[in-house]
Image (cartoon, rainbow, N blue to C red):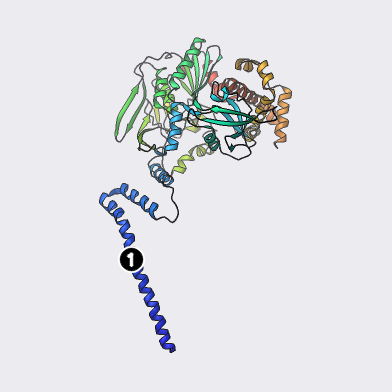
Amino acid sequence: MSQDNNYRYKALTVALFFVAGMLMGAFMMQRRIGRLRPVINYVQGGGGPVSKVGAVMRMIEANYVDTVDGEKLTTVSLDAALHSLDPHSSYIPPKEFEKAEEEIQGNFQGIGVQFRVIDDTVTIIMPVSGGPSERVGVLPADRIIMADDDTLSGKKMSTEAIMKKLKGPKGTKVRLALQRAGNAELIYVTVKRDVIPTYSVDVHFVVEDGIGYVKVSKFAVTTAREFEKAMKELAGAGVSKVIVDLRANGGGLLTSSLEMADMFLEADMPIVYTEGRSRQRMEIRATGKGRYRDMEMVVLLDEWSASASEIFAGAVQDNDRALVVGRRSFGKGLVQEQMDLGDGSALRLTVARYYTPSGRCIQKPYQGSYEDYEADLARRYLSGEMTGTDSASHTDTTKYYTRKGRVVYGGGGIEPDVVIPYKTDSLFVYQNRLSNSGCFYDFSFRYVNQNRNALKKAYPSAEAFTDNFEVEGKLFADFLAYTEKKGIAQDSASIARYGNQMRLTLKALIGRDLYEDKGFYPSYLQRDDDFLRALEILRGADMQNNI
């Protein structure tokens, strides 16, 4: 074959392959269009963004190059869409919904222990009193080596992963292998899981003659009952003035907050009102049946107090029933309705906003990205709001007026009547380093673990411990030596100035390891600036003159 004919032959072959490729491509495209036509018709026929989202999800699941986790894709997509509306509308997958319900209901199902991971091992801080672990003999300082066939020791496991091994439905069992001080061999116990109640009133006690303290950590189904019981005991002990601590209380159930506020307000006093585009204004007022309408009160708030905490604080502040001390609260004031999606998941959608009786919108402004909103607290700190004077924290100078005409400010969150800034002096840095390194926690735990029986004998109750235990010279010196071994050099100037606070911190943590919160708060609060300022206010001859 001549070179010219050979060239023509090759060209013809290439052309035939090219045409065949086009025909095959067209055929494959026709098949692809045929498969997609129902989806395309669904979008074109149904119209609107909802059907388009559904169609895109179907296309991804049918055609994406890798395997797709449909639930994860749904969660990410819905979160992004809802966060474009506001920061608190959310999609709740089935597993997270179950966890959220446990917190609101005030109980969960598991083995009933408080634990901390020390040296990569799950270490029992305290079994829940009367819980399933205590019933089978689990003790403080026991180290969980295995749960059934799963090794929990020597692994870097997240708290969530550990909880997954220990929690479980009521009636199910888990076999624990425990390492106990003084025992050469492992101890095996079988724990039958049960419902473990969680309490939202952490502690209450008489601070001094006539003044009480109540710490409320969240608002759950049982909160109002717990709070009323605590108040009844305090009143029976002669308390006529009370500090209600809502710091770091992220909120929860609205009805519990309303019931608590109702205990302190006269009949028909407004507690809160809501209003939204598709929801008419709805106002909630006090019944006047509360027993503590004349009790003087200071409420402690900080930047982590949110939602139901802000509703309670705003109600008693605007009605001149309490002074608020601390730092401006978080600013979460959106009314959300929960909508069941039929598969164990739910949609929490914002339908209105919460307003205090004076008209302040509790919700802080939401402009820009969700990430910017999440970084707001860091911005507030860096701007000097949390470290300056009370006037520095007014992010909005819009004035509102309480029942007696006192000025309160808008801008989101509840502005305290008395602002307590964070300490920023250089001598406080050393104490912060000790706290952030975990030295206080680790040393106190080891000390109690070695001396538990002797301590319990010497101080047989939380009250006896609070009244009589002291972090004396040798114990404090041992602590400082321990911190040096951990690589933190002593700062003599800081110790001279803040040594008493450090001793009280150690005492409080030792008390917690012995007697839980009842052994912790009475000591820790003695080095707490917010609490000490509230106590000073209540000690005044007539606090009502200040409101």
Q: How many numbered circles are shown?
A: 1
Quarter location, residue 92: top left
Furthest residue toward bottom:
2
Is 545 in front, or is 71? 71
Q: Quadrant of the C terminus?
A: top left
Q: Residues within 10 Å of mark 1 (few under 14, many from 20)?
A: few
Give the residue type that dot 1 points to: Phe
Q: Is residue 62 visible?
A: yes
Q: Is residue 69 above or below residue 181?
A: below
Say what secondary structure mark 1 lies in.
helix
Q: Quadrant of the N terminus?
A: bottom left
Residue 503 in the image, given as x and y percentages of width and height: 66, 24
The reply, left or right, for residue 101 in relation to residue 112 is left
Residue at the image position 28 percent from the left and 51 percent from the top: 42
Q: Is residue 544 above or below residue 53?
A: above
Question: Which residue has dot 1 on it?
Answer: 27
Furthest residue toward left:
45
Is 108 in front, or is 466? 108
The reply, left or right, for residue 316 in relation to residue 518 is left
Residue at the image position 36 percent from the left and 67 percent from the top: 25
Q: Is residue 384 visible?
A: no
Quarter location, residue 314: top left
Residue 482 in the image, given as x and y percentages of width and height: 71, 32
Is 221 in front, or is 272? 221
Residue 409 in the image, given as x and y percentages of width and height: 43, 29
The reply, left or right, for residue 539 in relation to residue 43 is right
Residue 300 in the image, given as x and y percentages of width and height: 50, 24
Quarter location, residue 310: top left
Is 150 in front, or is 93? 150
Q: Is residue 473 above or below residue 429?
A: above
